[in-house]
Image (cartoon, coloured by chain):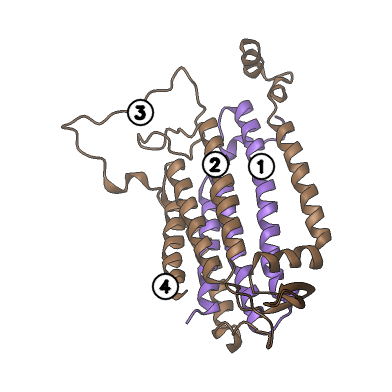
Chain colours: A brown, B purple
Amino acid sequence: MEVLFWLSFVVTLLGAAMMITQKHAVYALLGLLIAFVGSAGVFLALDAPFIAVSQILIYAGALAVMFLFVLMFTDTRTDEDQGLPGAVGSRAVWDPAQARPPKKRKKDEPRPPLLSGLVMPKPMAVVVSLALLVCMVAVIVKLPASYNSFGELPSVDGAVIAAGEAAPNYDTGLRRSVKQPDGSSLEVPRHVGYGDTAAVSHTIFEGFPLAFEVVSLLIFAALLGAVLLARRHLTSVPGAQEAGKEQEHA
Amino acid sequence: MLEPKVVLFLASVLFCCGVYGVLSRKHLIMMLMSLELMLNAINIMLVTFSRHWAGKGAGLIGAHSGQFFTLMVMAVAAAEVGIGLAIIVAIFRRKHTADADAAADLKG
């Protein structure tokens, strides 16, 4: 666990650093992806395997693909990028007629400087985020001594553990039957371990069922909203001439 | 020995990276990505506190509520990114750029 945590610690920080320093948007997205995978490792080290798997599936799987899709869809070119195709951050208006293919480096041409793919740090942003970091670290340092180590997970005495089952920690209040060697079955309380999928599902459906339903409604609304917002004829309102022409050609 | 304070420190650094990204980038997609990094940092904090209270003897639902909130944050983040990216695509169709300064006026 310790090794996994420190490995994920380094990977996550490197990914975040890559994300905020890379000029090229796709490289920045790659850094974000690395940070997500690293945080999945942190979740694993914190005994939350279900969260770790959801993190990989939702963030690293679906969200990253969505970002990549829209990055390909919109234009990331700029003219303050010192000749780096695909860099972001200018207010240049993209014109297909003026779009030039990325320059290929000739053999005898010198390599671009090593740091040319990185964005220059913005002083005010550095100051503000560092000040925030100092505040947060001050709070963390002042936490009471109970935060110096994670406590032991609880265990229940006298519970029946089937072969290959994790140590039981929490009583769910449900019962299950266990086959005895002589063919009869015995009713025993059903226990779950910390961070098990079963434990998380008990929390969702016994602890917070209303929140779960509301979130499903929210996602449904977001689905409809995304379809509505990205529809093509939104652009053909009067006044948007270029968009209207584009519509005629399409 | 894994310490809650170290994990919380990692999460705060991640959060500040996200803040820096939102403040320093002008591209809308980059800003949305930095926002995701901040939400991710909060998820790490929630799971840390969940594990902390599990070690202090919280019950089944109490010990896992941090993990539950993490799942909620993930779902809300997914919805938010879906809407945000749709808005960015709509802005790009109108303005032919995904720059944040291009969307500064109310009149389309």
Q: Of the residues shown, which amino acid type is indicated by label 3?
A: Pro
Q: Are marks 4 and 3 in contact (CB under 8 Å)?
A: no
Q: Are marks 4 and 1 in contact (CB under 8 Å)?
A: no
Residue A139, numbered circle: none
Cα–Cα gap, marks 4 and 1: 36 Å
Q: Secondary structure at mark 2?
A: helix
Task: Give the chain of mark 2.
Answer: A
- Mark 3 = which residue? A102
Cα–Cα gap, marks 1 and 2: 11 Å
Q: Nearer the viewer, mark 1 or mark 2?
A: 2
Q: Nearer the viewer, mark 3 or mark 2?
A: 2
Cα–Cα gap, marks 3 and 2: 24 Å
Q: Nearer the viewer, mark 4 or mark 3?
A: 4
- Which sits earlier in the primary sequence, circle 4 or circle 3? 4
Based on the displayed image, in which of its 4 quarters is residue A66 positioned? top right
Q: Secondary structure at mark 3?
A: loop
**Is A38 situated left or right of A232 in this image?**
left
